[in-house]
Amino acid sequence: MNGRKVVLFANTDWYLYNFRLSLAEKLRQDGYEVVLLSPDGEFGPKLQALGFSWHAMPMNRRSLNPLRELGVLAWLVRFLQREKPDLVHGFTIKSAVYGSLASRLAGVPARINAVAGMGYVFTSRDLKARVLRPVVRQLMRFALNGRRNALILQNPDDVAVFKQARIVDDRAIRLIKGSGVNCSRFAARPEAGEETHAPLRVVLAARLLWDKGIAEYVEAARELGREKRSVKFLLAGTPDDGNPASVPSGLVKGWADEGLLTWLGHVSDMPKMLSEVDVVVLPSYREGLPKTLIEAAACALPLITTDAPGCREVVSSTGEDGLRIPVRDSAALADAIRRLDDDRKLCRKLGLAAREKALNEFDEAIVISKTLRVYSELLDPAPHGAAVTSHRERRI
């Protein structure tokens, strides 16, 4: 396989740096020439400093201007014609669609599309999202099919959505749970001992989007604050201005000024932050498979999340490795936090079970190994494409 070239294409350089750097490093280690592609941003130079070939492209995530988008697609075709990769691996819906279309036009032999969650168009109740949904579905049908093509999804719910909508041939689907976490970076927190009356420190760490359950988190903080509980609510992350569901920073500052929570902003050292909290919350409406929950689990922290696609893959319905609550239910979220505040031994029990699950199912070595198996299927297909066109869904 040495000497083959792959392009990893995402809608932000932040995503490449935070979610796919280990994959890029493993590919390079295995002898691939790795090219990274995304819109411009502060993480591109960091990728270059690590020795990667990173290129900025003129894509605006919020643009709906057809002429501008055709220009982006034309730019991408020219880029791929110049680079001549053997495989393009696109992440998120827009990059998957554009990457696949451009790859076919540029004659790239193989394509992998990784859709981590269904994104704003499929999760929002906004009128714009509802109008765009059938258009995006049709675009995906056109772009994501073809020979030597695979679609990687992160949870069974998304697999069911794609199958029901007949967006791609079922034989192209691969289920790989998550983008992986280097669990060795996250140490299990030592047991608290007898000090069980310290204020419970709860954090929600995510991009500040409404569909991450930000409103429900704030309302739970209000409810427990009215009870005069000493729970400390922390919020880590920044608004995502490229996403229509972004929470305005002024509103977040207002919550902080009101004393409802402490806003940490962007956190670059997740192991350190997680070592300083007691509970991790993610009341999301829908995920691919949330990396923050896996990182918290690796630290043996108790998890509270929703019974939503992606989230339910991390926290099981039995309640043995975390607490699951209904989506968009701030009262249930407050109840779950209250329960852990009153029972610190339960915190420890849930955290240890979550860590064991993270190590066994979500470590990045497992995920990268499964991903590279898809690379092999597409770059070295069995005769007549037998490896790619098995008549069952690939769960690898």
Image (spheres, grey):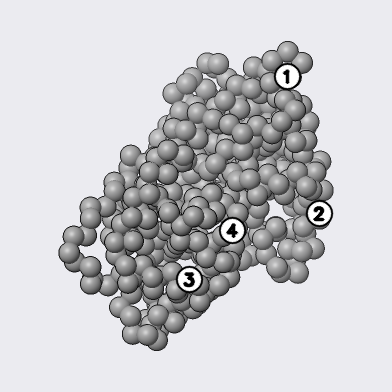
User: Is label 2 or label 4 in front?
Assistant: 4
User: Hey, which quadrant is residue 273 in on the image?
Assistant: bottom left
Amino acid type, callout 4: Ala
Amino acid type, callout 1: Ala
On the image, numbered disc 3 is attached to which residue? 333
Say if mark 3 contacts mark 1, CB within 8 Å. no
Whether residue 165 is visible, yes or no, is yes
Looking at the image, tell me whether mark 2 or mark 4 is earlier in sequence order. Answer: 2
Identify the residue shown where x is 19% and y is 66%.
Answer: 195
On the image, numbered disc 2 is attached to which residue? 135
Looking at the image, tell me whether mark 1 or mark 2 is earlier in sequence order. Answer: 2
Looking at the image, tell me whether mark 3 or mark 4 is earlier in sequence order. Answer: 4
Looking at the image, tell me whether mark 4 or mark 1 is earlier in sequence order. Answer: 4
User: Is label 2 or label 3 in front?
Assistant: 3
Question: Picture coordinates of residue 88 (x, y %)?
Answer: 64, 32
Identify the residue shown where x is 31% and y is 57%.
Answer: 348
Q: Taking 155 as reference, is 149 above or below it?
A: above
Name the image quarter holding the C terminus: top right
Asked whether, in this view, residue 299 is left or right of residue 326, the answer is left
Neighbor class of circle 3 (other Cα within 10 Å; few <14, some 14-19, many 20+) is many
Question: Picture coordinates of residue 156 (x, y %)?
Answer: 63, 45
Name the image quarter holding the N terminus: top right
Mark 3 and mark 4: span between their CA atoms?
A: 14 Å
Mark 2 and mark 3: span between their CA atoms?
A: 35 Å
On the image, numbered disc 1 is attached to which residue? 386
Asked whether, in this view, residue 211 is left or right of residue 146, the answer is left
Q: Label 4's element?
A: loop
Amino acid type, callout 2: Val
Q: Label 2's element?
A: helix
90 vs 179, nearest the viewer: 179
Q: Label 1's element?
A: loop
